Image (spheres, rainbow, N blue to C red):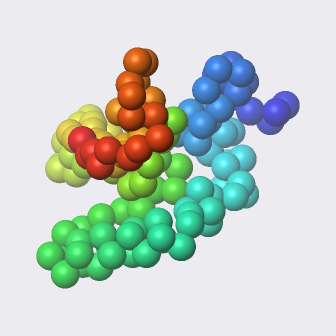
Amino acid sequence: MSRLSDLSKIRLQNNPLRILDSKEKQDIELLNDCPKLIDYLTASSKASYEKIKRSLDALKINYVENPNLVRGLDYYTELCFEIKYTGEDEEKTKDTLLGGGRYDLLIGQLKGSKLTKDQVPAIG
């Protein structure tokens, strides 16, 4: 904890997964030696992930895997993604154009939902 940036020390108390997405140099260096979420996928999730990558390859769609991508991981259930601008304008190369993923349990988590035990396939 003492090696985290000041911002990540705050995140540690409120939303620790956001540390994975830190832009602070000292956090990035620290994260290089940490376990990666991808190493903890279930067999089913890993198979689904590999199928998606094979599909992207077959369609000749370039992609970069980011083991530290954080997109509200508290409700995503499988793949999450971001599509970023990669043009020549360096100011915009960090801009996310689109992002989302699977969240099959979200509807059941909504207050007052009667679907608390059932999955409702969802993507967005």
Q: Is residue 44 left or right of residue 36?
A: left
The quarter of the picture where the N terminus appears is top right
Q: Residue at x 62, y 66 (%)?
A: 39
Q: Residue at x 47, y 70 (%)?
A: 44
**Numbered-mark total:** 0
Q: Residue 17, position in %: x, y?
A: 60, 37
Given residues 17 and 111, the one toward you in this image is 111
Q: Is residue 13 left or right of residue 92?
A: right
When the figure is inspected, residue 80 is found, relative to residue 49, above or below; the finding is above
Q: Residue 52, position in %: x, y?
A: 30, 70
Given residues 2 and 43, the one toward you in this image is 43
For the question of whether residue 101 can be seen, the reply is no
The quarter of the picture where the C terminus appears is top left
For the question of whether residue 122 can be seen, the reply is yes
Q: Residue furthest front?
A: 114
Given residues 100 and 78, the one toward you in this image is 78
Query: Quadrant location of residue 20?
Result: top right
Q: Residue furthest right?
A: 2
When the figure is inspected, residue 90 is found, relative to residue 32, above or below; the finding is above
Q: Residue at x 29, y 49 (%)?
A: 121
Q: Is residue 68 left or right of residue 65?
A: right
Q: Residue at x 41, y 44 (%)?
A: 118
When the figure is inspected, residue 61 is found, relative to residue 118, above or below; the finding is below
Query: Quadrant location of residue 54?
Result: bottom left
Q: Residue 46, position in %: x, y?
A: 48, 71
Query: Quadrant location of residue 89?
Result: top left
